[in-house]
Image (cartoon, rainbow, N blue to C red):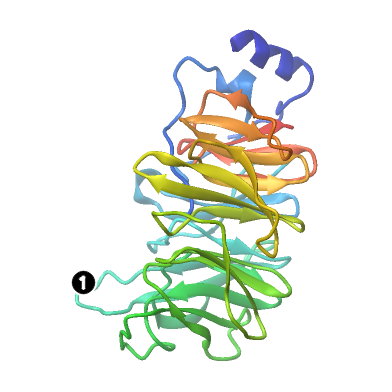
Amino acid sequence: MRILALLLALAGCGDNGSTPTDGGGGGPDASVDLSIAAGALATAQANCIELHGNRLFFVDETGGTNAVMSVATAGGSAQTHATGAAPKPCVAADDTFVYWVTSSTDADAAIGDTLWRAPWGSSGTPQQLASGQHAISRVRVAGGKLWWITDVYGPGDGMFSGKDAIVSMPADGSGGVQVLFSDLTPKGSRLAVDAANVYYSDGDGMYVRAINGGAATAVGTSTLHNNAFSLDAMHLALVEPAGNGMGDVALFQLDGSQRKLLSPALATALAVDASGVYANQNGKLVKLALDGSGATELQTVGARDIALDASTIYFTDGASILKLAK
């Protein structure tokens, strides 16, 4: 593996280094020289990464700093956008702002999440967008709006209905929180959004649903729900648990049709594009072929979250933000 890693490095894989679900997996394998196997973009105790353009955004929990940060995909010094609060581990970003959620420290508060944003291209004071929320999913930004799943029925009313809801609000904070769908079965905590649909998993399974309303279409099957998934413009990759430690990774069209088995083993930290499905499988970074022909081990390091661009795999192992050429 070290010989393979060295050959990859000599071929130009991830040699730019400089010193913040979905996800799981362990930290770095001590037998792997990360400076050779994958280029380190930043040292950070991060569980999620968000790729937008040529920057990676994350929360660094090192020493309890909980700093909202970013680093250029080409390398360089990491930039700090906010500190001092206690952000949830995942952020979102668009062309101008980075968005994050902080949680109330009041143990008696029924709801207590606050949504924030700050400009990432220049210095600026963080702006509070909404308070008294309860985001139980990763917050997403799409179409000029922020989206998340909440277990509070309606925006900020403090009433629990026994159902989860998908809600949204303008990304500039100019309007209130709006309920899109309020019939999800708890506990839903996976969400993705594109121009036409929301994709989510809840206590009953995985679904795709038109933003403008209508019934939910079930995708795949599982006996243990809150399925992990990832999508790009054409594909939806889904983990289908069948029991404790058992299940498949399958690939679908975005409408949930044309299931193809990619792996008869569970995985976490999925990311999919036209080149394959990348995942943490058995504590290793692997690539699953889209035609179902098998898995290729890329690193003996478990990824907690993965992001992709046309040429590079970015991932966090809980200690560093790393990159590796495809």
Q: Would residue 313 appear left or right of 246 to someone viewing this image?
A: right
Q: Would residue 226 appear left or right of 306 to someone viewing this image?
A: left
- Residue at x-position 54% and y-position 66%: 200
> Would you place residue 220 above or below residue 312 in this image?
below
- Residue at x-position 40% and y-position 66%: 203
Q: Would residue 320 appear left or right of 55 to someone viewing this image?
A: left
Dividing the image into 4 quarters, which one contains the C terminus? top right
- Residue at x-position 56% and y-position 71%: 117
Where's residue 255, x and y in %? Answer: 69, 65
Inspect the image, locate mark 1, and give the three-letter code of the amino acid beneath it: Ala
Where's residue 265, x and y in %? Answer: 50, 36
> Would you place residue 70 above or below residue 204 in this image?
above
Name the one closer to the observer, 135 or 95: 135
Name the one closer to the observer, 284 or 140: 284
Picture quadrant of residue 290: top right
Q: Indicate the secondary structure of the residue bearing disc 1.
A: loop
Circle 1 residue: 107
Picture quadrant of residue 296: top right
> Would you place residue 221 above or below residue 204 in this image?
above
Dividing the image into 4 quarters, which one contains the N terminus? top right
